[in-house]
Amino acid sequence: MRFREAVAKAAIAGDRLKYRRRMSTRDPLVVFTPSGKRGYFPVGTPLLQAARSLGVDIDSVCGGRGLCGRCQVLVAEGEFAKHGVSSSSASLSPFSEPELRFSRRTALAPGRRLSCSACVEADVVIDVPASSQVHRQVVRKEADVRAIELNPVVRLHYVQVQQPDMHDPSGDLRRLYEALESEWKLTDLVCDLSVLQILQRTLRAGSWQVTVAVHAAKQIIGVWAGLHDLSFGLAVDIGSTTIAAHLCDLQSGEVVASAGVMNPQIRFGEDLMSRVSYSMMNPGGAALMTGVVREALCGLAVDVARQAGISHEDILEATLVGNPIMHHLLLGIDPVELGGAPFALAVDHSLTLRANIIDFKLHRNARIYVLPCIAGHVGADAAGMVLSERPDLADEMTLLVDVGTNAEIVLGNRLRLVACSSPTGPAFEGAQISCGQRAAPGAIERVRIDRETLEPRFKVIGSDLWSDDPGFGEATTATGVTGVCGSGIIEVIAELYLAGIINQDGVLDGRLSARSPRVVENGRTFAYLLHQGAVEMKITQTDVRAIQLAKAALYAGIALLMERLGVDHVDRIRLAGAFGSHIDVKYAIILGMLPDCDLSQVRSAGNAAGTGARIALLDSTSRPVIEALVRRIEKVETAIEPRFQQLFVDAMAIPHKTATYANLRKVVDLPAPKESSSQSQTRGRRPRRTDTPNAD
């Protein structure tokens, strides 16, 4: 038996034992995804009641009487090692009479329950689908404006084919080849069988005038009677949290439609290693995750085609990027080898496949191009980021960071490039933060704290007004103030530091409770009351620690690359990804997520991975470029680097234990070092530092 399999079986057995012991001493644990919110509730608590007490967004208009069906949730099945939970349909009460009545009117999909009627019986993981959320997740991966050279791999060719006669015994396909060679100089062509099967009737329907789609000037993949001018491609970025798709006209290069969805794999784990763990601990788990992400891709293809007024059959080509675990799961490869050293990829080079091989419902003969991966945990999304930003063409030392549950980092210039991944975890996206949530209308995304009064003001997604502006209450009536998303979390922690509410070690100063009612007791420590409304939002000491751990992991990965290149500064920084695109870079540096840099040279790169996918879609000459470039990039493995731990410890301080941040100090007055308040003043000893986060 392989060691990893033995460990997995031992973990399952241990989790089951702990599960039985816990169940005899405490209330069941309910974990809601994708929000990541969790809590303990007495047996018999309705799921809707549990969700509302935690601030989980679930729709209901019938008052919980099982009539509207809008509060549907999905029970996750299997072992969830991260939560120490074994979840199944048996974790909830049997179907109630209201559910049975509703299902007779409208069939409930397998695994779905009405949260107003289903009650907690044991530990359970519950997924709240987008259709059941009042405030839908904002998928912030728009297509960036970019000049891209147009040279698509699929081209349409209109030809006049010689009709057969008794004196020329050649077949219709041969005469089609001859027409394409004569009119378009295309030679040595081959033809898909499914095209050949419809060729004769198509030629005759078009009176021997047809439009032919040719892939890479070699493969005939489509034929239409007469003139056909619809040729589209799809660029897809498969993130661990969100999936974004951009539909492009292959003849003009224009982005004609975009769409995004939450990655449905979230219900199997918020971060990447949780999904690897789910695959290890649940037979068939990898296949289940493969199925749901492929289904999501098909839904996106239909969505963007509908927006553009075309059929998904008009999509002739697709390019895909994603981190290694998303990459492997999409291809139907179990990612278990990525769960431990040496983090071996099944394949790292690019792939060109028929779309139907992965059940991607585009044109029947559409091809997909999957960009190459760089190394274990630095994937095709990082390759797309490199293709978008091209640090290899510059003299300046450029830092590229795709911030997500697993940060992918590339550093270098035209002389040398190095890369690593860093285990930031889901805290930056709002998960595991007491008042955190994913980006959605009503989520706090901007925060300022008055240095004298310690009073906060904030903005929420969906409104341009600050909370102290006239009309804010009316403007946010529809959404309310529901939680704090990633960009808001970064800003509130940085503002707490600038206001002196937390010190450089991240410790909340309880002495300030005498000065402001915003600093409140929270068990043995203190918290900062950000908002008092339907849901009380406090920034706790545990929240601060979670962000410190995440930002320290990110900074330590960057510092490790700087040491590898022997540089003490970077000239420019580009932040990629949905989260990186919406944080204020000044606050990211105040917090110490990034090394010091001239702020004018720090900016968002937008959805750089998705832009790289679009470049590969629209310019076929870019494909060999990125394939060669990723082979030049040197991979640094943080998990085995002895210096990583020390760099991590130094980076726990805000902004950093030893770095001077001279550029930042030119524009921001950083507070002087401040001693931690005594134990008596913080109502108990300082919470112990938790372990470094698991690699994603």
Image (cartoon, rainbow, N blue to C red):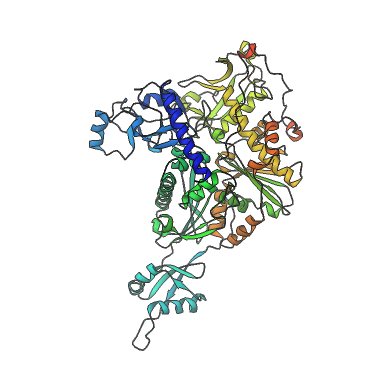
Of all residues, the one furthest to the bottom in this rendering is 167
Reply above or below: 177 against 583: below
Can you give x and y, in whole percent of width and height, for residue 347 in the image? 54, 55
Give the quarter of the image for residue 465.
top right
Expressed as whole percent of the image width and height from the top left, the position of residue 263 reads 46, 42
The relative height of residue 320 versus residue 655 in the rendered view (above or below) is below
In the rendering, at what x and y percent does residue 473 appear? 48, 23
| Depth check, front residue: 330 or 67 | 330
Please provide percent x and percent y for residue 497. 66, 24
Image: 379 above or below 184: above
Residue at 67%, 24% in the rendered image: 505
Q: Is residue 471 left or right of residue 201?
A: right
Q: Is residue 478 visible?
A: no
- Above or below, 266 against 626 in this view is above
**Numbered label tally:** 0
Taking 597 as reference, is 159 left or right?
Answer: left
Q: Who is closer to the viewer here, 22 or 486?
A: 22
Which of the two residues, 212 or 3, is positioned nearer the viewer here?
A: 3
In screen coordinates, is 672 left or right of 216?
right
Which of the 4 image quarters holds residue 448? Answer: top right
Q: Residue at x 36, y 82 (%)?
A: 164
Residue at 50% of width from left, 70% of height from top? 218
Q: Is residue 234 something that shows in the picture? A: yes
Residue sitting at x 68%, y 28%: 654
| Residue extending farthest front | 1
